Image: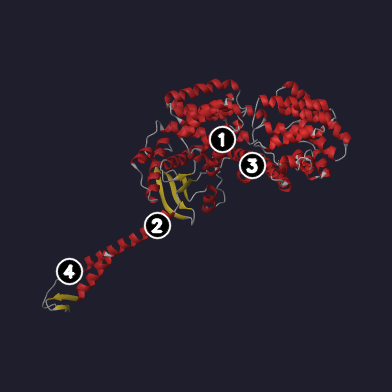
Amino acid sequence: MLGIGFIGSLWFSWIYDITPGGIVKTEPYIDEKVPIPRKKLKTHQATTFISIAIIIVLLTYRLIDHARSKQIASLEKTIAVLPFYDPGLEYQQIRNFEFIGHEITSCLLKVKDYKVIPWEDARKYSRTNKNYTKMGDDLSAAILVDWKPNETTAEKLLSVDLIAVEDESLLWSENFRIKGNWSASEIFKCSRRISRMINKTLRVYLTLEEKARVYQQPVSAQASMYATIGRSVTNDALEIAQTGELSGDTLKNEYIDSISFNRAINYFTEALQTYPDYAIAYAERAKAKLWGIKTGYFDRNILDECEKDILKAFELNPDLPEAHVAMGYYYFYGMGDYMLALTSLEKAVELRPDNSEYLFHLSRVHFSLGNWDELQFLSDKVFDSNPRNVLYLTNLGISYIYLHDVVKSLQCQDRAIELKPAWLAPYYNKSIALLAIGDLQEAKKVMLEAEKKTHKRLNRRIAQLYLYEGDYIRAIDRIEKPRNTEASDFGENEGDIALTRATIYKYAGQSTKSMGNYKIALKFFIQQVMFNPRNGFDLTKLGIAYAGLGMKQEAIKCGQEALKLMIKQENPIYDPYILYNMAVLFNMVGEDSTSLQIINDLLHRKSPFTIESMKLDPDLKYLVNNSGFALLNH
């Protein structure tokens, strides 16, 4: 308004003059009357023109800036720092550059106005052949930070772009010059400058406390870099080991030289050599060793080393969340002490309430203890954080099956399949969830798709689904195919396969072949029970083999022994499977009332089994549909 008023008054005063007689038009002076030097007049005109131009420019800038401020204010402050990938670089080089993305993410995480996608989720994202809108949707982010290191003989530059996902508009872009090498200290300083520019662009003003956190100097930038790379290598090695890409004798080898638990441990050791009092490195080194023990890469005799590292981390920093997490892993995955694991992980979550890693592993402890309300709460928190970790997703999906939330279970497994389409576990878990709602056709479709995507022959599982469908010809065709790796894929064995064959042949009317396979199963499970008489699950399978051979008393005895063991050593996860086998066993020997009581107990527990799934199993469906239905709904 001031600018417009100034221009108006200037124009008015140029044409008119205020006199005692009123406003009159200003008459131009004749040069002879008022000899004004032309140079002075030109200077006056130029000054006026420049003033007007400046005012117009300032007004234009203000209007544009106001519009831009409105645009930025409307953006959801959900940010993802995109991963860097160059197919021409080796794994090791990529890991070193990843420290840049980690540090930018770390700075943004310290600003309360932002919701930042954790770096461990973002770094695994495959951005190939995707535009920014698609990447933003996948990562659940409204704003993306894209970065790329550029190196020539003359200089090193870090190019950074800030992009609004909705319209792929460029909010800010800048090249940062790197002095010398891509050292940890240079990356540290550059990431803080980047964070400052992002805050300025997004109109986010930091409190003094936030500024102190963002610009806090690390104990050692180099040690921090080693620890960060070590953590990435640990997570990559764990995923390789648990998704079946690593098995058998290769567990004891340097299966991929740059991606192994040994390599991760070496990074943490280098961090400690750089800065001996680095508590986080001690805690993370212990976690790498514990994951190695869990996956069979290391022997359990290094548990003492793990404990020593954790205690050293506590000595250096008693309130370190990473130390509490490491101790939780030590008790849970190392010692099998769920209650002490619970205490440690709860303390870690108290210190970092939104950390998805801590929340996930705390949920696993509650799952093992059968604390279903706590499991529901924690699973929902992790699910809502939109994790891109396939191990989290598949396990969350299993939790939701037990919690009878099939919709979320399927969503978890679908996400896992999208992230790792060649991994078998999410397909198998998805088929279980579909059977829980009685969708046999879709479950079969999923397993057939799994065969194509994973390049594994899943004969036993698919034969079982054909059996449920009543298609005995296809079931027999499948079960008689040469077995490849299906037993190891599902943790199955010759006994499980023999029982499935026996059941298929029984309902196909081929009693001789059925009895022959029950005998194979009997021999196998007798040996298993002799080796471990406290395994209730194998006891029930032995009972089913006895029942199939018409040995009623031996079958009932196995069921009773399994029940005693289940009561004595309660296990909320595996007990439903024992109960299910017992229901089949007692039904096979004609003890319908006992079988129905067991089914009734099973249906009142959290488990993967439902009325709908039991109606598909030929060993139970007639009992459930006929004499048992009224009792089950009582």
Q: Secondary structure at mark 2?
A: helix
* Label 4, label 1: how far apart the Cα atoms are: 84 Å
Distance of label 2 from label 1 (alpha carbons): 41 Å
Which residue is located at x 51 percent, y 31 percent? 345
Asked if the residue at tag 1 contacts the one at tag 2, i.e. Cβ–Cβ closer than 8 Å, the answer is: no
Badge 4 vs badge 3, beta-carbon distance below 8 Å: no
Q: Tag 4: Cα neighbours inside 10 Å, few (<14), some, or many (≥20)?
A: few
What is the three-letter code of the residue carrying label 2?
Lys
Query: Does 26 sit above or below residue 183?
Result: below
Q: Residue at x 17, y 69 (%)?
A: 39
| Mark nearer the N terminus (4 vs 3) | 4
Name the residue furthest front.
634
Q: Position of residue 490 (x, y in %)?
A: 70, 35
Residue tagged 2? 70
Q: Tell me the crowding category of disc 1: few under 14, some 14 to 19, or many 20 or more residues within 10 angstroms, Cα based.
A: many
Say which residue label 4 marks. Answer: 39
Query: Where does label 3 land, which residue?
Result: 404
Q: Nearer the viewer, mark 4 or mark 2?
A: 2
Disc nearest the viewer among 4 and 3? 3
Q: Position of residue 621 (x, y in %)?
A: 78, 41
